[in-house]
Amino acid sequence: MKPRLLALASAVMLLAAACGGAEPDADGAAEDAATMEPEQTDEDDLNGSGEDDPNGSGEDDPNGSGEIDLEAGYAFFAENDIEMALAVDPGGGMDAYARAIAAGLAEQLDNSIQVTHRTGAGGATVGNWLTSNAGNATVLTFNRVSGWVLSQLTGDERVNYDITEWNAIGRVVAEPRAISVGAHTGIESLEEMLTTEGLRFGATDLGGGDWVDATVIVNAFGLDAEVVAGFEGSAATELAVIRGDVDAQTGSPASRLGAEQAGDILQIGAIGAMPGEDEVVDISRVTLASDLDHLIDGEEGSLLLETHSNIIEMGRGLFAPPDLDANQLAALRDAFRNMILDEEWLSQMEADGRPVDAIGGEELQSLIVNVAESIPDAYIELINVAD
């Protein structure tokens, strides 16, 4: 295990020990948004101060220095524009979500939010940028939480951030990972795929999210299969699946919908949660990988799949840098809560086909800590590509 992974594990364990067993809402249903200001207890204290929640409960000082002043936090943002940077290129589903969030949050903060794109290094570019802006509440980033977590766990040398140090503002939606096969395979179900020998999974970077998905699937189910990495993006991987150069891939359900509608691929499985009915051609064909436990390869296989599913379920999250002013962090989290309770904003998201399955920043912060705490050595050793 590389020193960076050891450091991450140590930081996670320290945070988890101080957490005292707090139970976050892992389901993150939209109706739970009304409970996003939980009563403060000693168990909620993530830095062991015995007083205030260091990650901001909505009433207590996120930095443990006393009562917060929401008006002062909002006043800061009324005078300072925000940049929300993404790890992806313009035009995709992540970009569309980010722009909708930027519009909704800007309305709550009475100012503008500019969406920018800081791509590269498998998401490490924008992650490093956020960490380098410690203390600056005018910069945010939005992405799949699992992407950042997995980049750390795989030992990617480009990673100079620690997601446990960031300030979570909230999760907007829990997004599953779809398992797709090419029409050329003739495979029509996940169970059939998991009992077929000699399959080839396509992936982008070694250590990338789709590579980890496939590596976990192969090892959790003991498949006779190969993971072929090196495709330049998920679109290139999809083209390879359509051509028959490889047989399967994983990724966002919505991003596979076009090829599925064209009859070139079939979405047959999912990890983390089921996709929305509008994200697949035939939802009845999709099976959760965790539901096929009779095919899983022993206890370690179950542990690998459960760990990976938990990481994926963290969904798409909005983050601010470390070391923020208490009033400014509280204002960001309060504005996020108000946004996801705004009926007009929710109606627009529904009309645009963008599901909302939100949890607040405090819940997301605790979820990250709890998930990271439970990552077994077997999982880290499997996906670590640093050596």
Image (spheres, rainbow, N blue to C red):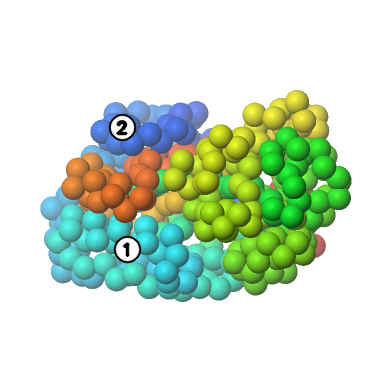
Please give the name of the residue rendered at 36% of the width and 50% of the height, measured from the top-left corner.
354
Q: Tell me if mark 1 has few (under 14), some (14-19) or many (20+) residues whose alpha carbon lies within 10 angstroms of its own.
A: some
Q: Earlier in the sequence, mark 2 or mark 1?
A: 2
Q: Quadrant of the C terminus?
A: bottom right
Which residue is label 1 attached to? 99
Where residue 292 sits, quadrant-wise, is: top right
Q: Is residue 367 above or below residue 230?
A: above
Q: Is residue 166 above or below residue 112?
A: above
Please tell me which residue lies in front, 20 or 253.
253
Across and down, in percent, residue 5 comes to 67, 54
Can residue 245 be seen here?
yes
Please give the name of the residue rendered at 30% of the width and 58% of the height, measured from the top-left corner.
100
Q: Is residue 327 left or right of residue 249?
A: left
Across and down, in percent, residue 268 comes to 63, 42
- Labelled pair 2, 1 in contact (Cβ < 8 Å): no
Please give the name of the residue rendered at 41% of the width and 46% of the height, measured from the top-left corner.
173
Q: Is residue 194 left or right of residue 288?
A: right
Please give the name of the residue rendered at 82% of the width and 42% of the height, measured from the top-left corner.
196
Q: Is residue 173 left or right of residue 233?
A: left
Which residue is label 2 attached to? 31
How far is disc 2 from disc 1 in space, using C-alphas? 23 Å
Can residue 148 be seen here?
no
Please tell me which residue lies in front, 78 or 259.
259
